[in-house]
Amino acid sequence: MKRKLVIIFLHICEVVLIALFYLFRGLTFILPFKAMKAICTGLGLSFYYLVAPVRKDLVKTVSTALPELKKKEVIRIAKGACREGMYAIFDFLMYVRHEDKYLANLEVIGMEHYEEAAALNKGGIGLSCHLGAWTLSMAMPPHFGVRLSPIVYNPKDTMMPRLVRTLYKYGKQMGGDPDAWAFETGKNTPRRATEHIRKGKYLGIPVDVGGSRVVELFGKPAAMASGIAHFACDTGAPILPANIYRGEKPYQTRAVIRPILKYELTGDRETDLQAVMQAVMKQLEEEVMEVPEQWSNWIGLGIWWKQAKHIRKRKSEKDS
């Protein structure tokens, strides 16, 4: 009975969210940029103030990760994480409506790093995260000569498949690699994605996703997805960190491509996976700290810490 109620609740939430998505889509034709952003800001802050458990967990997580910060700064970052959940949809819909304005206000930094990676002729792995205007990470790069295909969740494996399909429908209209808009997670995904890299193409992987590999992140063990390390070990392709940050002015964004992430493979799979993952996590920390208020996954960090404890406890019990 309880399971049925949960399913019904999720269906209701899904219908409401789809309706809100189309409402916001319509509002982009009526309201100016600042008004749309103000609505999303208000919704994000409402979530912060009204959902006390999330607010408390967020403040605790940020203060634990960044103990040197004063409480006022911790709260600013925690509020930012809640706003980012709404800004992700805001960026997505506003870009679909005002692509020309976004491109006119786009600043690209670090193209020489992409050219260095391309010269290796090994394809590449784009290291990304849920930071800044991340929902534009497929749409904007083709306009400055970069195409990549991200790994995304299969809608049927999510709690709200119809909502995810709706988002993908519009996502495909935004651009990306014409040969492979994205790779939905599934049985054949690793093989297909590896072949994609070996053809000299780029695979985009968000690394701030929970998983089963325990690595250090913001000073504590965290359980993270290790797909990027597996692809690196299988292909030897360069890992190229890149993000699109949201600017302060309307339609303003800044695409930053960073130097190739250095890693060396020893041939020992477990050692190599751990080494690559730890290098990736260090890179993630550096990127987040540039604009911590634009990282939505402060919400997930506390969960990953807790999951790492469970994994280590189970391993300890198994070994004893």
Image: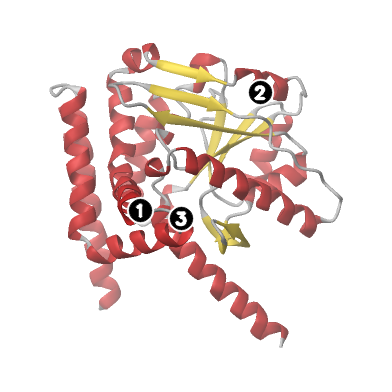
The amino acid pointed to by label 2 is: His
Q: Return the residue at label 1.
A: 74
Which residue occupies 61% across, 59% down?
216
Q: Which mark is residue 256?
A: none
Mark 1 vs mark 3, CA separation in Å:
10 Å
Q: Position of residue 50 (x, y in %)?
A: 17, 59
The correct choice, above or below, for 118 with respect to 42 in the image is above
Quarter of the image where the C terminus is located: bottom right
Mark toward the start of the polypeptide (1 vs 3): 3
Q: Residue at x 77, y 38 (%)?
A: 236
Q: Position of residue 275 (x, y in %)?
A: 73, 52
Where disc 2 sits, the SS reads helix
Tag 1 and tag 3, C-beta contact below 8 Å? no
Q: Choose mark 3 or mark 2, whichever is in front.
A: 3
Q: Quarter-wise, where is residue 224 in the image?
A: bottom right
Q: Is residue 134 above or below residue 4?
A: above
Residue 62 relative to residue 304: left or right:
left
Q: Position of residue 12 (x, y in %)?
A: 20, 57
Q: Nearer the viewer, residue 254 or 211?
A: 254
**Looking at the image, can residue 206 be seen?**
no
Kind of residue sitting beneath label 1: Val
Q: Is residue 251 left or right of residue 198?
A: left
For mark 2, what is the residue?
113
Residue that lies at the very extreme toward the left in this rendered image? 30
Select label 1 or label 2 by which is in front: 1
Alpha carbons under labels 3 and 2: distance apart: 33 Å
Looking at the figure, which quarter contains the N terminus?
bottom left
Q: Amino acid at mark 3?
A: Glu
Q: Nearer the viewer, residue 223 or 287?
A: 287
How would you rate the neighbour count of disc 3 (Cα within 10 Å): few for under 14, some for 14-19, many for 20 or more? few
Mark 3 secondary-structure assignment: loop
